[in-house]
Every structure is written in structure tokens, then in C-alpha cells.
Image (cartoon, rainbow, N blue to C red):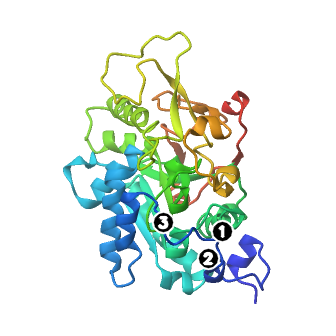
Amino acid sequence: MTSLIEILTQQPVDAPSLARQIEALPQLPPETSLGADIDAANRILLDPAVDEQAKRTELLAWIGRRQPCLFGRLAAHEAKGTAASKGLGINVCWISESDIADGADAVSAKIQHERRAWKDRAEVGAASGFLIMFNSAKLAFARPSRELLDLCLVVSNLYLVEHAPIRPDVIYTEAIPLREANGQLGLFKAGCNIFYGGAHRTLNHDRRVPGGLLFSMNSPGHYANSLALRGLTPDFEEAVDFVRETAFRSIGNGGISHPAAASTSWHNRRVDGTELDERKRPAYVPPDFDPQRYSASYHTDVLVPTEVTIDDRLIDRPAEDGEVWSFLILDYFSSALFPPDHVNYALFRSHPIEDCDKYHNPWASRVAHNDASFLY
């Protein structure tokens, strides 16, 4: 009998098992260093004698210190119960080697169970992010390649079952519920990204992570609304300002453990050269940065980007070694209302739904195009 996962992913019945697909991935040489930070974390995350809870703790510790995205750092601090969290909660779904051995159906069932549990917490503002960690040595040292790209598509199908079969170079958004003070339930769009160890020093360097392959989903808009709803900021406008500023400080913060400190995302400069304001920011945020658009060596909203996932070249200057995406948007960090057909709809203002649609993901996918026309 053909399984549900085989139907959804459109794979033949005799396709290799998930475990065999991972086992067959081209590997980096065993002596490869992925940076001192990841090397140290992998000694715990890839040790079969270490229990899952200790591995979770180690992953969160790494994210809290070494993840370029400051939203990830805040969420890691929240999960560890530290004062630096700023109220940004996450749920973590852990997929072990044993889970992988149980097969694709079992892995997908576990992810969907944990996905619903996350959305239950999100409804009351307790979690704006969701991580899925495929904890595997073969994934941790998988070399950027066509085979890795294909594997990313396979495991994406196990998560975003409503969109299967997942395609490369496409933007997929998750839907996160939040119940407003008046009782109305609404949905926010959330980004979906993949991180893996072999990204180290490549054009995908900012997407490096220890321990295997990681899905990360988060919604800055859900977070901002939850801050105001829980009284953690004086009002919604101040919450938006805090979240916007956190985003500004995340861009250009890559290059961690890269010998040339080469971030694969960076700020554009304002055409007129004027400074945005007098607020003190890190040196990688220029005083005349553009608050509307930024650049990267890949589209940061694409789930499985082809070129940077298959390119195993080590690079020093991303802007000179590959394609540059110069039209990545920041203007959605706003309390403004957008119409339903606008690309910024439901990012900071919720899409109202009935309670029965709480777990439904209504957002259509979008193919990424590297030009300004894609913005609208």
C-alpha cells in the first residue's frame, strides 16, 4: 500500500529510505573544521553517549552565542530561562538518529505533532518560533552538493506537507496563530529557513549550525504583537520599534568563525548618504544604512536555495564570488495596514480566522526573482 508520505512527496514506492538517503550524502573530509565554535558543539551534539536533553541544551547554548540572527539568540535565552530572552519563546522538535531509522512516515508524524503543540503555545503568545533539529553526523558533515539539495527537499516535504512536493528557489511561509485581547484569532506569516554544518565558509555561511540540519521558523510580527498583548512593552508601536531594531542588528552579523569575517548578508547604503538617526549600533550597521532594503548572497526567505546549497567553494568575499540579491525587504517591519494581495499582508497585522482554522496554513508559495519587481 502506498503511504501518505509517498503520495505527498510524489516519490516512487521503491525510493531509498530516509536513512539511506542521508547515509549516501557526499561528506566533507573527516578532518574538516567547521569553526572552533561548531567543532566544540559537535563533540556533544554528535556523541551517541550524550542524552537528548544535554544535546538540546548545547544547541541552545550555541544559538544563544553564535547565531547571527539576534531573534534566534533571544529565543535561545528564553528556552534556557535567562533574563536576556526579551520574551521570545520557541518550541523545539528533536529528530534523532533513531527517529530517522523509523522512516519518513514516523518522522513526519512526529513533526506534525510537535508543530501543533507549538501553535497551541503560539495562540497565547508564548512561542513565536519553531525549530526542527535533524541530529545526525551525516547531516552535520554533508558537503554542499546536488544530493544535499535533494535531501533538503525531501525533509521539507515531511514538515510542510500542505505544500509537498517542495520546490527549490521558492518562498514558503508558515502560519502562526495568536488570539487577540478581544478574543479574535488571527494568523501571522512566518519565514522558513534551513541551516546545516557544511554551509561553513561557503556562500551560505550565515546558515551554518552544529549537530546536523536545522529548520528555523519565526515571525517577528507575531512576536511584536505578543509583546504588546502580554504587557512586555508599553504598546504595539514600541514593540514594533524593538523588533525592527533587532532586525537591523541581525543583518550583516554573519561571518562568525569565518577567517575573513565575511557575512553573507549586509546592509545597503542610502542613496543620499543621510544617516537614519543617532542611535548607537554595531560597526557592521553603517550610519547611512537603508532601512527599507538589504543585500545577501542568497534570498534569505527562500527555503531551499539551489546555487548556495550545491556550491561547495570556500569564499572570502561573498559579494564578489556569487549572485547578489539587492532587493531584500525590510519595509514590512511596520504597524501599517496592508491589503490582502500585498506581499506584506499578515506580517505585522494578523489575518483574522475562525477557531477551526487554527492549524491551517493558507499562504501560497512564491518563486523568488532577483529584481525589484518581486517586491510587490
Count neighbours of disc 3 (C-alpha within 10 A) and say few if under 14, some if 14 to 19, many if 20 or more.
Answer: many
Residue shown at 60% from the left, 35% from the top: 319
- Residue 246, percent across and down? 37, 36
- Residue 98, x across and y down, in percent: 49, 85
Mark positioned earlier in the residue sequence (1 or 3):
3
Residue located 34% across and 33% down the image: 242
* Amino acid type of the residue that numbered disc 3 sits on in the rendered structure: Ile
Q: In the rendered structure, which amino acid carries the disc numbered 2?
A: Ile
Near mark 1 (Cα within 10 A), the count class, few <14, some 14-19 or many ≥20, is some
The residue where tag 2 is placed is 22
- Amino acid type at circle 1 is Leu
Residue 349 versus residue 83: which sits nearer the camera?
83
Mark identifier at residue 151 = 1
Give the Cα separation between the discs numbered 1 and 3.
15 Å
Numbered label tally: 3
| Element under disc 2 | helix
